[in-house]
């Protein structure tokens, strides 16, 4: 979690996404809540429905599931963690 956040913080900017891909949506939600809870209040914009955290530099941390691999296409992803 720290590595992905670090990548987004130091290499992120508007239009860049950083993904946490978990085997199931429930597991992705666990990582989302842990990172969100570990950051200072107001540091990121949180979207609990989309499971995204937007950093002040415009980078987006997105928490996804790998249940349907075809849904993992389309965005410019600059770093990712594949949770097993």
Image (spheres, grey):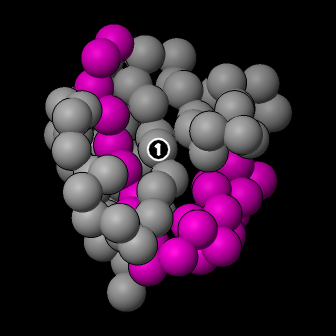
Find residue 65 and report its image quarter: bottom left
Disc 1 secondary structure class:
strand
Q: Is residue 43 visible?
A: no
Residue 5 coordinates in the image, percent (x, y): 43, 48
The front one of 84 and 41 is 84
* 48 relative to 55, above or below: below
The front one of 71 and 38 is 71
Residue 58 coordinates in the image, percent (x, y): 43, 16
Q: Is residue 45 visible?
A: yes
Identify the residue shown where x is 35% and y is 66%. Answer: 68
The residue sitting at the bottom extreme is 84
* 16 relative to 34, above or below: above
Which residues are drawn in magenta? 14-39
Identify the residue shown where x is 77% and y is 24%. Answer: 42
The front one of 30 and 3 is 30
The quadrant of the picture occupied by the C terminus is bottom left
Residue 2 coordinates in the image, percent (x, y): 45, 60
The reply to whether the magenta stretch includes residue 17 is yes
The front one of 56 and 17 is 17
Count residues near mark 1 (Cα–Cα under 10 Å), then give few for <14, some for 14-19, many for 20+.
Answer: many
Q: Would residue 69 appear left or right of 29 to someone viewing this image?
A: left
Label tally: 1
* 40 relative to 80, above or below: above
Residue 40 coordinates in the image, percent (x, y): 74, 38
Q: Which residue is mark 1?
A: 62
Identify the residue shown where x is 27% and y is 64%. Answer: 69
């Amino acid at each position: 979690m720290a590595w992905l956040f670090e990548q987004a913080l130091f290499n992120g900017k508007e239009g860049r996404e950083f993904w946490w891909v978990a085997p199931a949506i429930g597991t992705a939600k666990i990582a989302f809540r842990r990172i969100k809870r570990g950051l200072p209040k107001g540091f990121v914009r949180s979207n609990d429905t989309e499971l995204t955290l937007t950093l002040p530099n415009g980078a987006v941390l997105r928490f996804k599931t790998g249940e349907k691999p075809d849904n993992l296409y389309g965005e410019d992803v600059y770093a990712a963690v594949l949770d097993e």
